[in-house]
Image (cartoon, coloured by chain):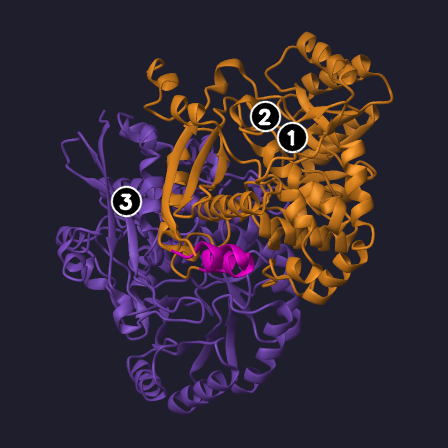
Chain colours: A orange, B purple
Amino acid sequence: MSIITEIETFDVRFPTSRDLDGSDAMNPDPDYSAAYLVIRTDAADGHEGHGFVFTIGRGNEVETAAINALRGHLLGAGVEALLEDMGATWKLLAHDSQLRWLGPEKGVMHMAIGAVVNALWDLKAKRAGLPLWELLAGMAPEEIVALVDFRYLTDALTPDEALAILRAAEPGREQRKAALRAEGYPAYTTTPGWLGYSDEKLSRLAKEAVADGFTQIKLKVGASLEDDIRRVRAARAAVGPDIKIAVDANQRWDVQEAIDWMAHLAPYDIAWIEEPTSPDDILGHAAIARAVAPIPVATGEHVQNRVVFKQMLQAGSLQVLQIDAARVAGVNENIAILLLAAKFGVRVCPHAGGVGLCEAVQHLSMFDYIAVSGTKENRTIEFVDHLHEHFVTPVDVHSGAYWPPSSPGAGNEMLRETLAAYSFPDGPVWKETH
Amino acid sequence: MSIITEIETFDVRFPTSRDLDGSDAMNPDPDYSAAYLVIRTDAADGHEGHGFVFTIGRGNEVETAAINALRGHLLGAGVEALLEDMGATWKLLAHDSQLRWLGPEKGVMHMAIGAVVNALWDLKAKRAGLPLWELLAGMAPEEIVALVDFRYLTDALTPDEALAILRAAEPGREQRKAALRAEGYPAYTTTPGWLGYSDEKLSRLAKEAVADGFTQIKLKVGASLEDDIRRVRAARAAVGPDIKIAVDANQRWDVQEAIDWMAHLAPYDIAWIEEPTSPDDILGHAAIARAVAPIPVATGEHVQNRVVFKQMLQAGSLQVLQIDAARVAGVNENIAILLLAAKFGVRVCPHAGGVGLCEAVQHLSMFDYIAVSGTKENRTIEFVDHLHEHFVTPVDVHSGAYWPPSSPGAGNEMLRETLAAYSFPDGPVWKETH
């Protein structure tokens, strides 16, 4: 029996805006950041749980405050009780009746709960000596169902339906685990397509992406139609007809504007249009999806919770569902979303990039392949080659695929030196610029 | 020309959980709280702008941190430029590209923007020497349209349509202003119906409400069907057949559960069912509305922004739209929502109570009556008789109506003694309980 003895939080920021990495139509100058926590216990094993919320700079201190607001549920609590029933632990955090007012289940407070939940999963996986994907993929269907809060979901997915999905995938688990180790999980890259890059840089990076084995790239669009047509053409010329090109508007458009704009890009064989409008606009996405078909609509990195995903699936708002490791309330809620996607037969292609999102989200897609949807057909995880060097177990992406991590944990752990150097505003990286 | 010289923030909490005032099926022990700010300038007039986010206790410090995250847009900024183009000021705050990641436009960060926007309106109204409702109701239709951010709205409401709505209401403004002063604006009361109250207390308070001139009361429901039937019966027996009884489930149910539960309460002539399920569930509310008709569905106090309200109107999710002064991003966004409601012909009955919500939201309904919808038919503002004594200009509610305030400002200003006494955790009220 051990207890949680310490919650340490960090406001970590990387000055990415200096190079226009990560620039898009809505986010011209992001400083990729993490509101980060470490959970420590008095257990002899010395394991820590690490988790974070990804943000893009200002406000990271608000997110850190939100993580600290959850201390009362953690400090002094029994570690085994929390980790053995992660479904109950999720509810303990998400249903705090006073904190719930700040959402409910959305925005700053919900993401903070996600960071804590993910840190607990990191600790649980380390204690089990397994990478998170393998820990999850080894759980019985009944155990997985018990992780999910079905509140507000039962008109679309009941616990019994979820159980049936998981049981149907049970027979092939070992075979798919072997396939995952042999083949990896498909990746695509956004590295060529940031809006701040010149056409020359875009074309060069697009060719490099193909040479590196990627079969899909993604371009940011939405600031200027003329520029977008030119950039999509340049990308198509660079990669040839067999490489998929997705485009991403980062919420820039109104509904009709999205439909009109995409009519101009459609001739270039677009793999999907991502975030055409507000992530809250379920009906708007559905209208866009009907109008731009057969181009699929993709969204999810800013979709606040499972209730909105449920409706997007019910309404036909998306054909590509993009989970994010640090937007909703952590692993448990993402499992709910994976089950919803499986129920509706919609493919999941996670959002990643930022800082640590690749490291974290790969575990969920790998778990999904082995134990939920049972397929990686037409699925692909975003990859951006930024900031991986700051992680204890950086992703292994090569030959156009993510390769399954073998280290115990959830992939969230940053290097100690990074936490110190990039601490805001007092770390050396920031002190020298102030 | 003057500039903003100081932003002072306060974490103010009232120990309301001690008496079970404000208890409902999802919020068993709220401590009504405000993340509060004061904007000071170097102008000779000495006017201050006051604003707040209402919360129910834990996490109020996170909301206060979010308000502080907006300081950079305010300190040193020219007051006249900010106040003269409040549409541009709203966008400056809501579209901060880094802070936007924390929403976008929802939860902790969005409510903080609302508090700042409302504080600026408070300052603007004080400078104009007018109560906010009168300031707004005196603006030209073009000026009002310029306050609204139509991003993500144009598939339901264009600026031209908004202008037409406002112009159509222009001729009767003076007449309605006079009617407002003569008749007040209808109010209903939730005071009798908190879940923590005994049947005896409920019946006594319900009778008192009728004696005080209220024609509608509201009961909290959703914890126990048996209890709800007994309580609704008791309330109906207490008030007789001519008083409206609304019920409020505070998001307790799943979709089918709401439909089934309401079938049992329907025989008691229910004025509306409020918050039957998740405030994010646009399609779920629409399904409930179809099933429980002709009982209207009411929601809004937790509806995060204008984009969700837009869809609820498009989908027929609600028949009573409940704006809240401190949930969305302030006066500007609530004007967008009032215009949407007018476009769809849906009545607006604001959520209030908590602390300061009555003081603030009355201005919006009065403005709506004079300059937007042009009617108060079948409309009513919630009233709860809590904590008004802490405000510089407490509401004047009597004879079943809100009476229009005449003091300059937006109604948000708390007494200085209150800010000191209830400051958390160091104010004397909290020190003695720790």
Task: Read off the residue under disc 2.
Answer: A25
The answer to whether the residues at label 2 and label 1 have Cβ atoms under 8 Å apart is: yes
Task: Read off the residue under disc 1.
Answer: A249
Magenta stretch: residue B381 in it? no
Spot occupied by residue A210 in the image (x, y as percentages of width and height): 78, 17
Closer to us: A8 or B6: A8
Task: Read off the residue under disc 3.
Answer: B122
* Mark 2 vs 1, N-terminal side: 2
Crowding at label 2, few (<14), some or many (≥20) Cα neighbours within 10 Å? some
Q: Which residues are magenta?
A: A77-95
Measure the C-alpha gap from mark 2 to mark 3.
34 Å
Which quadrant holds residue A403? top right
In this rendering, do the residues under marks 2 and 3 share a single chain?
A: no
Which quadrant, please, contains the C terminus of chain B? bottom left
Closer to us: B176 or B110: B110
Mark 2 — on which chain does it sit? Answer: A
**Is residue B221 depicted above or below B242 in this figure?**
above
Is label 1 in a helix, a strand or a loop? Answer: loop
Residue sitting at x 57%, y 40%: A409
Amino acid at dot 2: Ala
